Amino acid sequence: MTENSNMANNDKNNSKDEKPLLDKQLFKETFWRSFPLQACFCYERMQNVGFAYQMIPALKRLYPNKEEASEALKRHLTFFNTTPTVVTFITGVCIALEEKFKKAKDAGEDFDVDSINGVKTALMGPLAGIGDSLFWGTFRVIGAGIGTSLALKGSILGAILFFLIYNIPHLFVRYEGLKMGYQGGINFLASMSEGSIFATFTEAANILGLVVVGSMIASMVNFKTPLVLAIGQAKVEIQSIFDGILPGILPLGLTLIIYILIKRGAKTTTLLWFIILLSILGSVVGVV
């Protein structure tokens, strides 16, 4: 009994003495690296390079081996897009997940490495909605309203207040979000490690992603045909036939064709030129 109690006490002491990965130095490096999130923005993977740039200090510390560090960096070069002001929360969660994966790997325990990107994907959409509504739809509008009214009177306070009203909450959320994401990420893992919650969460994230993609196709892909068939004295609009079968079937079909071509190795630049030429020719002929 005495030996067991001593071992238990030693384990507790070791867990207390263990320092968190996100110390002051790593926190500063990661925080400042979060600002150029969109410096290397592209329409294929959005903010993926900027997000991976944030993760480099933590990945270097976790994976001294270059091959392991390279594999970890590749994980964070997948598609990513969210409101820049809230990105640090996701960064903190991912650092905690990478730390948990490293410890599990060293201990020979199982850990689903795909869950790192799964959690990241699940968080970026909801947080983008919150960030857009708060910062783009609230603080920016309020700051612009107050700042413009003062600027019209010739006061320099207009520009100053606009800057402060937007950036004080922005910097606070960006700074605290990194702490909350890292600390919450560890607790998040502890609570989700029981049962099959990870699998359920990942499945829910996939469903949510499909719903978002489907709504984006219907609302953002504009692909219609003005063709009208004349049968005797009657005229039939082809677009109404398609809408009767399934509203938005043409945008859906075009998206599926592009998706299949990408899966088969077609370059996105080539497909972009294809869409441009199809739009021009279809407009000239009167088909689309």
Image (cartoon, rainbow, N blue to C red):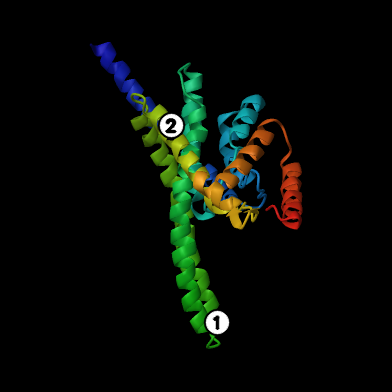
What residue is shown at x 66% (from left), y 27% (from top)?
A: 66
- Residue kind at label 2, given as amino acid type: Glu
Place of residue 243 in the rendered image (x, y in percent of width and height, measured from the top left): 52, 49
- Give the left or right position of residue 108, taking residue 266 as reference: left
Q: Secondary structure at mark 2?
A: helix
Furthest toward the left, the residue is: 1
Count of labels in the image: 2
**Few, some or many residues within 10 Å of mark 2 (<14, 14–19, 20+):** some
The residue singled out by tag 2 in the image is: 203
In-front residue for pair 12/285: 285
The residue singled out by tag 1 in the image is: 156
Q: Quadrant of residue 264?
A: top right
- Residue kind at label 1, given as amino acid type: Ile
In-front residue for pair 82/9: 82
Place of residue 45 in the rendered image (x, y in percent of width and height, measured from the top left): 63, 43
Place of residue 77 in the rendered image (x, y in percent of width and height, measured from the top left): 62, 38
**Few, some or many residues within 10 Å of mark 1 (<14, 14–19, 20+):** few
161 vs 209: above or below: below
35 vs 203: above or below: below
What residue is shown at x 46% (from left), y 64% (from top)?
A: 137
- Give the left or right position of residue 183, taking residue 98 as reference: left
Q: Is residue 52 visible?
A: no
